[in-house]
Image (tube, rainbow, N blue to C red):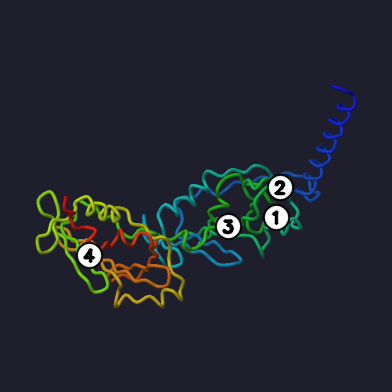
Amino acid sequence: MTARQLKRIAAALAVALVLWGLTEVLSGSGDELGGDFALPALNREDVDTVAIYRSSDTIVLAKQSATEWTVNGRPAAPDAVESLFKALSESSVAELAATNRASHSRMGIDSASGKRVRFVKGDRVLAELVVGNRGPGYQGAYVRNAGADEVYLLRGDLANVVERYVDEWRDKRIAEIEPDSVQEIRVERRGRRYTLRRSGEGWELQGGAAADTAEVRRMLDEYRNLRAGGFPTAAQEDSVDFDRPDRKVVLVGKSGPLLELLFDSLGYNWWAKKAGGDIVYRIDSWRMNQLAPADSVLRKKES
């Protein structure tokens, strides 16, 4: 290695040290770093309400029972709620990042831009955190206790969780019907109706025509774990008309109806609602011919 190359390496190291020093000074805003911080050790049993206040909206998770929560008054997905408390327990404090309140705006953790997360039991606030911008390298996020000046760099998934939109918290489950529990299928497609019934090991259409058992099974498999693609806006929900649905599917078991689902198309989207229910779901358009196929698809083909 030549003397010139050694000088270049030394110069590069010097620049790197200077940049590192500047980063330390900026992140601490000139303060001596120190302090102590611990995330609240809370789980779903400890909390009645979790409120996430953001500049754009407010998310309110409210416990209805040991297993059921709502988000802004709508059923919440159990795994979404669980992920919040999992992120809380699995995140860790990496370091104290700043002690000067003047740093809050730059770190996105001031009262204007920070995401305030409040954990409540009855009328008592158990903990309140403020989550700010992502940390260096987009890893972790800055966090502080509400009312405190000290800011910490947090490693973990808490920042991702508190950034979710309302629809990401909502329960997208529409139906969970085991195919073997279905004895009869009734379908309406813009006024045209057909019915399938089990016949021995197979299926037959009303009138006695044999059905393609594989196609019927493929249709029923869609209802084994049917999830919504999303939810309508308020304007879209007002425009959907389920009084005269474009399609309707009724799955009947040995003791009566297992599911009655109404479908309506609006623009490029399809929407679904359970008969008697009040929640409207968005259905991906490509699924509609699988959920409510034409009877010609289900009819057994001549060999």
Q: Position of residue 24 (x, y in %)?
A: 78, 44
Residue occupying the far top of the picture: 1
Distance between the alpha carbons at the discs numbered 3 and 4: 47 Å
Q: Left or right of 79: which side holds 164?
A: right
Q: Nearer the viewer, mark 1 or mark 3?
A: 1
Task: Give the label, 1 or 4, closer to the camera.
Answer: 4
Which image quarter holds the N terminus?
top right
Q: How many marks?
A: 4
Type of residue at label 4? Val
- Judged by depth in the image, the label closer to the viewer, 3 or 4, is 4
Q: What's the CA distance linking mark 1 and mark 3? A: 18 Å
Disc 3 element: strand
Alpha carbons under labels 1 and 2: distance apart: 10 Å
| Residue type at the position of mark 1 | Met
Could you say which disc has been placed on residue 97 in the image? 2
Q: Which residue is mark 1?
A: 107
